[in-house]
Amino acid sequence: MFLAQRFCHHARVFSLVASLPPARCFAVASGNRDFITSDGVDKEQLTPALQQYFKFKEQYKDYVLFFRMGDFYEFFFEDAIKISEILGIALTTRGKYKGRDIPLCGIPYFTIDNYLKKVLRRGLKVAVCDQVETPSEAKKRGKKRKSPVLERAVVRLISSGTLVEEAFLTPRQSNFLCSLSSSPNNTHYGFSVIDISTGEVAVHNVEESHLSSLLARYDPHEMLISSHLQDHLPPSVRNFIRANNPGILDAPDSPSCMLSVVDDSYWDDSSLASLILQHSELSILQQPLSRGSFSSMEKQSLSALLAYVGTMQMGRYPRLFFTETEISATLELDKNTRDSLNLTRGYHNSTLGSVLHTLDHTATVMGSRCLHNRLSSPLTSPEAINGRLDVLAFFMAHEALTTALVPLLRSLSDSERSFQRLLLQRGGPQDLGVIRDMMRTCLRIAQESKKEVEASNNSYLLRNLHVLEAVESSPLFATLSRVLNDFLPLLLTEGGFIKSGYSTELDKWTALAQNSSELVSSLQTKYVESTHNTRLKLKWSENLGYFVEVPTSAPVTEPSFFTCQVLKGHLRYKTPELNELDQMKYHATEKQRRLEAALFGELKEAVEKEGDLIRQCNSFLAALDVSCALSKVCKEYGYVRPVVDNSTSLSIEELRHPVVEDLMMKQNRGKTFIPNGIDMNSVTSPTRSYVITGPNMGGKTTYLRSVALCVVLAQMGCYVPARRATIGVIDKVFSRVGSADDIVNDRSTFFNEVAETVTILRNATSRSLILIDELGRGTSVEEGVALATSVLQYLHSMVACKTLFATHYHSITGLAAKNEGMRNFRMCAIPTGKSLLLSYRLEPGVSEQSYGLFIARMAGMPEAVMREAERLMREKKEEKGRVEAYVEKLDVNAMTPVQALVCLNEVKEMVTSK
């Protein structure tokens, strides 16, 4: 049911930027040439090779077909024109058809990985069609034809979300593929996600309001939808696709999330149970499916996901491990919040300047991915959070052990992905070596940590210590250690990875294949002596085998030498002895390769049998690496263990911003981070809303982010940058901090600010933490004040969440006197002449002004502009002062109505005179 043919006939790729329009391709690539298109030819009139090409192209219509022709992968017709532009390679022709050129381009077969990356970055799918027989095998098969067409087959299907090859993956990041199904009224969605390079799979049943957070959390590289959903995409999904596809502006970069529309039959979940039973790798899904844990939408999305993976991996599946299904199990963070907090991305969309960059002192890529996933998915269960904190506390208390484990961890390669590559038939001898070395390291880690772990009585560490110790009795470890050489080739075809002495038969054929080089040396000496030609060389090529080469000026005349090739400047000869040597080498090499391939297959089966043990080891090693790395950071920067519980408290003393503190220390500015605190809903403070005023650059935004990051770090199971912290679990964090124009969607900065605020008001709960910075600045002062005031009042009174509200609208501070649980705070600043001393200290009260002119002078504003601005400010203050002084002198109780009207008119003239 899930055969490749079924998919290729029904699936089609829908991407907003998947490829350039054909017309544009022709205009750019073809110039004035008269190229013929594929739909303009009669396939029966083409050469046998092109007929074979079309057979595969019709099967894989929506793929770029890499068609192997000898030492090249070639592209024809529309694919050639498209690929020549994407790869920047020459476009040529392969003959003519009815007087019109057949477009052609090609790449050397050994460069395929480099070029595949460029094609995949454009959001295209690839089908790799290889030769599956040699020319000599083809000749034997087709004796009646002089040049029979080589047998070919599609051996790889590749898309952005189904990558397993190391060359295409980012080592320290997951590579997720997701599928999205919808309820009939499009109000609820099934969201399934998988990283086939590691085996992680999750299934969710969510409302539309949660989709944005899920997409931001997993950041998938490819999304599957049905044709029905294509016309009814939820706004959050459409926005995510647009935001991750710069190509819609004709930018040269590719989409980072490809949208693929697969046939509606793929969402049929009637055969899901049987598929899971047929493949042991999927067995982890059997229990939740049988007990009815999945909704109908979840089953539909999971069915499409597995069908698609099976197609792209030629019927094979990774060994899966299942993560939580409840969306409430993790702290909800939408894309805007993640971006404003710089959780995993900092400067220029890299990790530099992010929280991840500050924390990531991991020794392995597996640990780095684990840390990335924890930071992207903080927990909401105090029990689970404290379990992680207990493990971290163990390594904080055992610094010597941590120091000893780091070199062992650093010796590990990516055994997580090597394991999955072997299961998916994409692995090689090096991947087997990675598994062997990982198991060896497990034993060394168990020996190193056994004493301290057993003394700790930590159930998690004890359980995993037993997992590591189980490697010693593993038949797989013993076999791999006995069979594999120390230095292993990347590819199976390179051979030489089995230890000498393991297989007598293999040793025999290996010796024969290697001894041919000794025979070659002796034959060359013999031929030089018999021909008296010191310029004679014995060489080898794939087409000729072994041959004798001499200069044209010194031909060989002996009758046993017969000419096989004449070149400019050289003559080439064969002899009966060389023909025998060819046969011996070919036969020995073939036998060696077949025996090695059979042994490799046996070793892969052994790996698969021990799959559960390997996965458990990989999982613990990644978590162990994270704990060791975090303990180093926490010790170096003085982080403390937070108290995390189900209370509603948020009480943190002397909190710091982890990234800013890290940068200050690394840049050695001679400054230290000024800590601040927060005390909400605690025994000592019923406050739940802070209204914060103060100058620009005074630290308001940094303070807001510091609070949120302390919550995120605590709930991911890490110590926090503070002196003391008590954190009642938060369910959602929303940050409306900083915005910009959205040119793609034709949205102004103000519109984006308001849209983000709407999302907060609709989704926040009483257990949420809200950060709002300078709301309303993109419109008139009157409208901005009205909007900001109303939002703050709504969050405080209606939602009753924890709110940090930074503003330059000082009139808003009046709300604190009218609302219980709301307090005013300010960032301290002291004007000194024409400069401003920023203390970065948060204290109760209201800032007298925003000191905008001071900041402008610090930024280098021309003095002439500053003088004029200061003059205008003085006039405004003087005018306001005159009005206030005049009104204060009035005795309204002693006025007659006529006098009151006269006074009112005078006030009006004073206000409007300017």
Image (cartoon, rainbow, N blue to C red):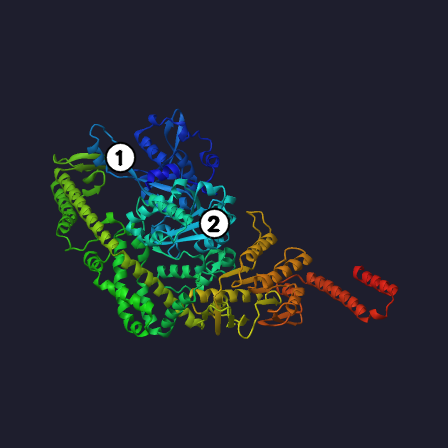
User: Which residue is disc 2 drawn over?
Assistant: 188
Element on which disc 1 rests = loop
What's under tag 1, amino acid-wise? Leu
Q: Is residue 296 above or below residue 637?
A: above
Q: Point out residue 10 in the picture as x, y percentages from the top left corner.
A: 39, 37
In the rendered image, residue 910, in percent from the top left (x then y), is placed at: 81, 62
Question: Is 677 left, or right, of 569 in this rendering?
Answer: right
Q: Position of residue 577 (x, y in %)?
A: 12, 40
x%, y% of residue 289?
A: 35, 51
Which corner quadrant holds the C terminus? bottom right
Residue 850 visible in the picture: no
**Residue at 14% of width from left, 53% of height from top?**
503
Q: Amino acid at mark 2?
A: His
Q: Is residue 614 above or below residue 17?
A: below
Residue 2 occupies quadrant:
top left
In the image, residue 789 sits, relative to residue 257, either above or below, namely below
